[in-house]
Amino acid sequence: MSSIGEFEGKDIPESYYPKLVKELEPINKRLNAFLTISNPEGGFPFSVKDNICVNGVESRAGSRILKGYIPPFNATAVERMLNSGFGFLGKTNMDEFGFGSFGLNTEVPAKNPFDERYVAGGSSSGAAVATSILKYHVAISESTGGSIATPAAFCGVVGFTPTYGAVSRYGLIDYANSLDKIGVMARSAEDVRIVFDKVKGSDKYDTTCTDAKFTAKDKKKVFIIDQFTKGVDEKILSSFEKLVEKFKDMGYNVENREIRLAEKAIAAYYIIAMAESSTNLAKYTGFKYGLRNERFDEHYNEFFTKARKAFHKESKRRIVLGTMVRSASVRDRYYSKALKVRSLLLDEMNALLKEGFILSPVMPILTPKMAEAESLTPLEMYKSDMLTIPANLCGLPHISFPYAYEKGMPLGAQLITSQFNDYAIMDMVSKWEKDFEYRFKYNLGEL
Amino acid sequence: MKIGLEVHVALPTKTKLFCSCSTEASEPNTSICPICMGLPGAKPMLNEKALEVGASIAKALNCKTQDTTSFVRKVYFYPDLPKSFQITQTEDAIGREGYLGIDSKKVGIRRIQLEEDPAKIIREEDYTLLDFNRSGVPLVEIVTEPDISSEEELREFLTELKSILYYLGVDIEKEFKVDLNISLGRNRVEIKNITGVKNIIDAERYEVERQGKLLKAGQEIAAETRSYNEAKMSTEASREKESEEEYGFIYEPDLTTYSTKGIELAKPVFASRLAGEYAARYNVSAKTLKELVLFNKDALSMIEHAKEKHDMKSIIASVELLSKYNMLDMKKERLERLLLAVEKGVYPDKETLSKLYKGEQVEAAGDAVDNKTIDKEIREVIKKNPSILEEYKKNPKAANFIVGQITKKYKVHPRMVSERLNEILSG
Ligand SMILES: [Zn+2]
């Protein structure tokens, strides 16, 4: 099932790459998956989410304020991909700085390749669309609260978010540093594994990056969590029940359990994420890189303020809320408490994950149309992350995979496991793929 | 009166606090990288050497032992701050709850924290330049309790602290910046960013007078941030106002918690305390000894080396002599010859001294001029000018011209002449 293995087994002519770019360009004009397209110049093509730095290529995290920022260095993950012989194809679209679940908080939103009236999901919208339309391609992507699992589910691809710290974040334009994880999207779990093996492992440039040994401990138990089915769309639930039956057929004991603190996860997540992101966004002052204010005759305060008007509305919201929750008078009530919730939730989830895997849908709602998603209030949007946030908040590895098609649109489920047991869930999805064929509307670059 | 200080000094590391850029570049903006420029995507990596020095300072200032230490982000907007936040320390600082003893009391040390220096601002007439070579240079900030209550104590505290830092390898001339908190009344006034001891004392004097006048006039002293104007020798209210509230500290999530257990701590040297001890033990002036050793490792090490075998007065004289000609790093085994000569009352001239320094053969370390010759000479001068005795009794400086004459004639150290002269005149 590995497309990387298949590709490498073939004799690829040099003309393949320019042809691929030519084929991709017009379709990309419609779907807006890529922000830049380069000739991959040999090697298996990979794309890079726009918030991950590529030396000499504009990297602006989907933001206007970073327009023109060309980093003079590669992110460690990119460097390792290039050193492993992969070919860089381009930067992929995303919600500004990763702030969004539907890919709409950007200049030109990516569209769902299954039906262009629908969202691609966010924040790694472009990575998911690219994976869904290209036959031979993997996406280096990033998740803070569900930015890999959600678009992977909406676009019908495999999305893997590793244990926090498994892949170096050096070169990642920060959203929330204690939550950001670089991961992979691909068309099979086997491709995910190949890429993960290339990019993982300690890096002196990222202190939080671990050199832990990753395992594949299979557990014969799968937990369905009450809090992860409550409030989920009926149509999703009924097809999810069929998936659960199939896991039973695959030999897993299925049990229903509770994660009591799961209900507090969204609040804790958004407090930590906003607190950290409001500090990360402080550096964008239109001064040394990106969008530059050319008027130097003003006081620095006015100068900075003018530049910061370029932020998208959602970013401004997070700066304001994030600054509020970490201010001295309320820090204990919000920020400190959220840190406590995170640590308690991790304890609760760890206890469960020692015995088995967690299986749940990725999204509680069916893929929304662009206009539907746009009409959601911020709170409704934040709540739609209720199933992806607990694992992300705790830095637990999880993998999203297509398991059904509802009126032609893919549905995604996710498996969560304990820290460092990343290979186990890849193995499970590989097993799943033996009896379930993924569908794709495009297969650009077919050989 | 209550005075508290926040003292900032640069740590003696070859590279910056969170990247491997050199701390020693001179050409502006040449020692920079994505990390210390705060480029999007870059992450800090801690320089463990800075942690070592920080922990050593904490130990020297009697801080409670911390098992671990971690960092926070302090957010504020200023052109010299590349990330718009400074990575610094608060509760989990490398040092907490210590003290520094001065003559009259112990001055509490609230906290010792590691932090990164912002870029250097160079203000020109109608534009401003930034030099990011300084951005990310490791600083240590020493925060005291408001325990200092006089100018004398302030001066003493600064001298003692500088000496301790000097002996821990800190280049105290490179950067010595202080935020001074002074309150005569109820409200605290903070004077930010004063460089150097002289300015600190001047700022303190001005502020004490200013606040004193206000109080006398029955006026309230506003809690505010002020800055020191060196040219006018006065303080003035600053425009910028930041409070703890606005900094919005959060844990620095790009760094972890660092264990301080395995850190090898430098042994602190309390030069001032040693000088006091030796002064009492060997019956010499504590002031002279302190002046010699507070900021001079070589001088202290010579004194320690020689103190058992030689007379302390001669040691001091020798050290002064060597110090005068910048030869304090003389090899210890060559010191012996000099000490013996000085003990005999013979002070080698520069030429002889430099031979001794290089370990070259010398006929005699200035034996040509011994006490007898000098005594004879002094007596002769007195015979010629008998009134000198009377003048000397009124004002000892009157003898200076004798010392000058003889020093010139025999190329000897003035101390030798004045010692002989004192003996003769008082005897
Ligand atoms: Zn640097």
Image (tube, coloured by chain):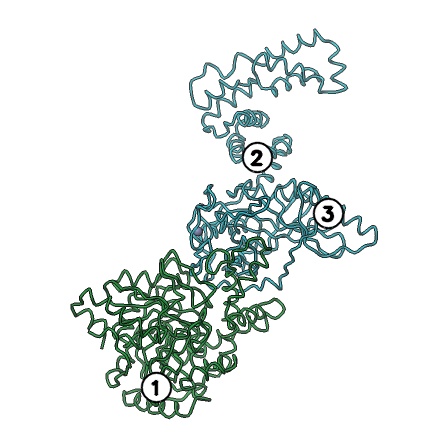
- Mark 1 and mark 3: Cα distance apart in space: 73 Å
Disc 1, SS: strand
Disc 2, SS: helix
Q: Which residue is mark 2?
A: B293
Chain identity of mark 1: A
Using the rendered image of the protein, determine whether residue A75 is visible from the camera's viewpoint. no
Which numbered circle lies on residue B207?
A: 3
Q: What letter labels the chain drawn in cyan?
A: B
Q: In the image shown, does B393 or B204 lie closer to the viewer?
A: B204
Does the CB distance between marks 3 and 2 fall below 8 Å? no
Does the CB distance between marks 1 and 3 fall below 8 Å? no
Instruction: Tell which residue pokes out farthest to the left in this image.
Output: A11
- Image location (x, y in percent) of residue B64: 56, 56
Q: Amino acid at mark 1?
A: Met
Q: Amino acid at mark 2?
A: Val
Q: In the drawing, does residue B89 fall left or right of residue A389?
A: right
Quarter of image, res A96: bottom left
Q: Name above or below for residue B317 compared with residue A198.
A: above
What residue do we see at 54% from left, 28% from top? B323
Q: Quick one: label 2, few (<14), some, or many (20+) residues within 10 Å?
A: many
Q: Name above or below for residue A123 compared with residue A52.
A: below
- Image location (x, y in percent) of residue B326: 51, 27
Which numbered circle lies on residue A409?
A: 1
Residues at discs 3 and 2 both on one chain: yes
Q: Name above or below for residue B137 compared with residue A371.
A: above
Q: What letter labels the chain drawn in green?
A: A
